[in-house]
Image (cartoon, rainbow, N blue to C red):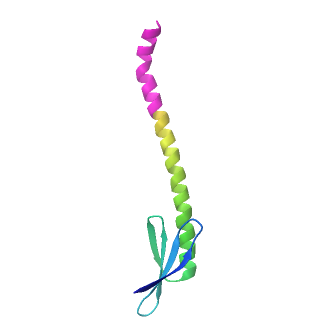
């Protein structure tokens, strides 16, 4: 199967065209995700979706890390509280 790079987005995602026996197949690739489509319009829509998903995924990861940081701080402060009160008394 011969391939040809058709499109590279501003965010680095790509659309490649593969020539099959009877038709073309379009591969959408963004970061580590890949999807195959039967037409260029679907491929472009899927690329937009994958790139939005990647941004949303990063935002969710940052929120999760912040929540974990707050929970760890709360745990450490509650565990240290009895020792701190003894030291200050």
Q: Quadrant of residue 36?
A: bottom left
Which residue lies at the image location 46% right of the left edge and 39% below the top edge?
Answer: 68
Q: Is residue 77 above or below residue 39?
A: above
Which residue lies at the image location 53% right of the left edge and 61% below the top edge?
Answer: 53
Q: Quadrant of residue 10?
A: bottom right
What percent of the width, then of the height, locates residue 65? 48, 43
Q: Which residues are the magenta region? A: 72-89
Q: Quadrant of residue 21?
A: bottom left
Position of the N terminus, as image quadrant, is bottom left
Which residue lies at the image location 52% right of the left edge and 53% below the top edge?
Answer: 58
Which residue lies at the image location 56% right of the left edge and 77% below the top edge?
Answer: 7
Query: Total label count?
Result: 0
Q: Is residue 83 magenta?
A: yes
What percent of the width, then of the height, locates residue 2? 42, 87
What percent of the width, then of the height, locates residue 87? 43, 10
Q: Is residue 38 above or below residue 72?
A: below
Q: Is residue 10 above or below residue 22?
A: above
Q: Main secondary structure of the magenta part?
A: helix
Q: Is residue 39 magenta?
A: no
**Farthest bottom residue?**
22
What percent of the width, then of the height, locates residue 63? 53, 45
**Farthest top residue?**
89
């Amino acid at each position: 199967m011969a391939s040809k790079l058709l499109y590279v987005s501003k965010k680095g995602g790509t659309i490649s065209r593969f020539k099959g026996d009877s038709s073309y197949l379009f591969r959408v690739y963004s970061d580590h995700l890949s999807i195959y489509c039967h037409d260029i319009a679907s491929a472009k829509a899927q690329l937009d979706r994958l790139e939005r998903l990647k941004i949303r995924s990063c935002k969710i990861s940052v929120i999760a890390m912040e929540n974990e940081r707050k929970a760890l701080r709360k745990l450490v402060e509650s565990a240290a509280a009895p020792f701190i009160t003894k030291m200050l008394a």
